[in-house]
Amino acid sequence: MANIIGAGQIPQQPQPKVDISASVPFVCEKCGGKVFLPAMKWRKLSKLAYGGDQDMMIPFEIYVCGDCGAEQESLKPIQLRALEQKDKLQAEENSSSDL
């Protein structure tokens, strides 16, 4: 069997040169705070939905403002934003069908 040089190693991607002096502070979308704390949101997947023997808990890391506690929508994972939008639409449909 041939010995392949570098096999199993991930090639290094060139890092872009970034001038951080051109950056601007990120501020809370609600209060303008500048300090953020990591937090977790969890979603539960029923064992019936995926064929497991117990429900699955799925973690999503989010960031909240250290001053007011507001979740920062722009820092949420895209998958979580999509799921929350779907949940919101479902809740609206359910409340309108109850009328």
Image: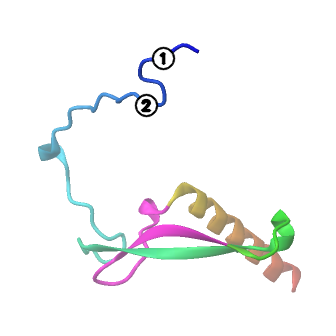
Q: Quadrant of the N terminus?
A: top right
Q: Amino acid at mark 2?
A: Gln
Q: Nearer the viewer, mark 2 or mark 1?
A: 1
Q: Does residue 12 appear to the left or right of 84 in the view shown?
A: left
Q: Is residue 11 above or below residue 84?
A: above
Q: Residue furthest left?
A: 21
Q: Earlier in the sequence, mark 2 or mark 1?
A: 1
Q: Is residue 83 above or below residue 30?
A: above
Is 2 included in the stretch rendered in magenta?
A: no
Label placed on residue 4? 1
Q: Position of residue 64 (x, y in %)?
A: 38, 75
- Taking the spot 25% from the left edge, 75% from the top edge, the residue there is 33
Assign a secondary structure to mark 2: loop
Is 62 included in the stretch rendered in magenta?
A: yes
State how far apart marks 2 and 1 are (Cα): 11 Å
Q: Quadrant of the C terminus?
A: bottom right
- Taking the spot 21% from the left edge, 59% from the top edge, the residue there is 25
| Count of numbered labels shown in the rendering | 2
Magenta extent: 57-76
Q: Residue furthest front?
A: 1
Label placed on residue 9? 2
Q: Along the line of sight, which residue is nearer the eye, 42 or 79?
A: 42
Assign a secondary structure to mark 1: loop
Q: Position of residue 51 (x, y in %)?
A: 85, 65
Label placed on residue 93? none
- Taking the spot 54% from the left edge, 13% from the top edge, the residue there is 2
Q: Quadrant of residue 11?
A: top left
Q: Along the line of sight, which residue is nearer the eye, 99 or 60?
A: 60
